[in-house]
Image (cartoon, coloured by chain):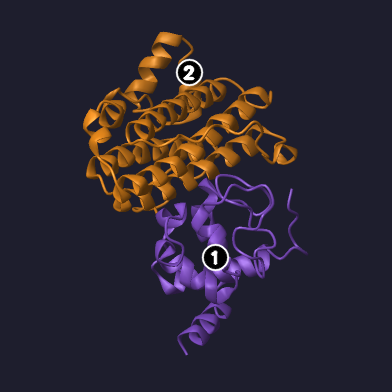
Amino acid sequence: VIAALAVALALAGDAAAGAALYERCAACHSLEQDRAGPRHCGLFGRRAGSVPGFDYSDGMKRSRLVWSAESLDRFLANPDAVVPGTPMSIARVPSAAERADLIAYLRQAADPRRCRAR
Amino acid sequence: MSFIALGNVPDPVARRRFLRASGLLLSGSAVALMAGRDALAARAGGAAASDVRILNTALAAELEAVAAYQVGAESGLLQKPVLDLAVTFQGHHKEHADVLAKTIHKLGGKPVAARAKYAFPTDQLKSQSDVLRFAAGLEKGAVSAYLGAVPVFDDRDLSKAAASILGDEAMHWAVLRQALGEAPVPGAFVS
């Protein structure tokens, strides 16, 4: 039920608000390029730790996560609890509404039909 | 204070005085906060390892910022005094990177190295404003990253040092916004 609610919340997020929130991620991430964090283009449906050539933490490589609205919601709420040792521990998003907005934005902007990984 | 005002300070000594008065030059105190603390070396275990991971994330972002400002400086798109400002900001990021790397060493970790190549969106940088907007985005992201890091360090002195860097990079962000003709401080809080 909780997972279903999370997915429903993510689907209800405001992508425009999420675009503004995504600016917080810009120290480490971009849609199209690997930076201190991996690129987000093609994120949904991608297995965590699988962008070729990116140097993931061991925890992320072992996580067996597949990125979806539900898994992103859980991860962003408390990254270290989902993937112990992840550098994303500094990027916790405690607000469920903000996570929903971010996920709504990423669902659109990280769609590989709209972005181009470089 | 505008870039027009900065442009009216042509003398290098006067400009440096201006920058210092503007709070744009870091003192050595931030360096002393982390690199001078030999006691850090005595810490061990999971807490130190966690701090090292966070420091290395910050270091990777700082090294990228140094490279980004280098791209901006060499683009031929920045005019003085904006160019001088970009070089000053790059120097701050170099100082941040140096102290982060030294601290990681003291904690027994291995600092990440700068990448041989960064994939910056250079094809989208056509004007001074494009470069400034790109740099402002990096600075804003850095502020958010340090804001996230401050409460999760095990060592409170590392939190204090991260807050010191946060303050510097928030100033960068504000000055870059001002140069773009945007409100330099868009709100009462950063996030």
Instruction: Report the residue marked by disc 1.
Output: A18
Q: Amino acid at mark 2?
A: Asn
- The chain to which mark 2 is attached is B
Labels 2 and 1 positioned on one and the same chain:
no
Instruction: Report the residue marked by disc 2.
Output: B8
Can you name the residue that lies furthest to the bottom here? A1
Answer left or right for B46 relative to B111. Answer: left
> Residue B5: where, in percent of width, then height?
46, 24
At horizontal 75% and vertical 63% (from top left) the residue drawn is: A112
> Residue A38: where, in percent of width, then height?
60, 52
Query: What label sits on residue B23 in the rendered view?
Result: none
**Number of other residues with Cα within 10 Å of mark 1, as a class: few under 14, some 14 to 19, many 20 or more:** many
Answer left or right for A77 relative to A27. Answer: left
Q: Gap in Å between the C-alphas at discs 2 and 1? A: 40 Å
Colour given to chain B in the rendered image: orange
- The chain to which mark 1 is attached is A
> Residue B75: where, in percent of width, then height?
68, 26
Place residue B67 in its image quadrant.
Answer: top right
Could you tell me if residue B185 is visible in this image? no
**Number of other residues with Cα within 10 Å of mark 2, as a class: few under 14, some 14 to 19, many 20 or more:** few
At horizontal 69% and vertical 23% (from top left) the residue drawn is: B76
Colour given to chain A in the rendered image: purple
Could you tell me if residue B73 is visible in this image? yes
In the image, residue B138 sits, relative to residue A40, either above or below, namely: above
At horizontal 25% and vertical 40% (from top left) the residue drawn is: B43
Q: Nearer the viewer, residue B190 or A3?
A: A3
In the image, residue A115 sits, relative to residue A54, either above or below, namely: below
> Element type at marker 2?
loop
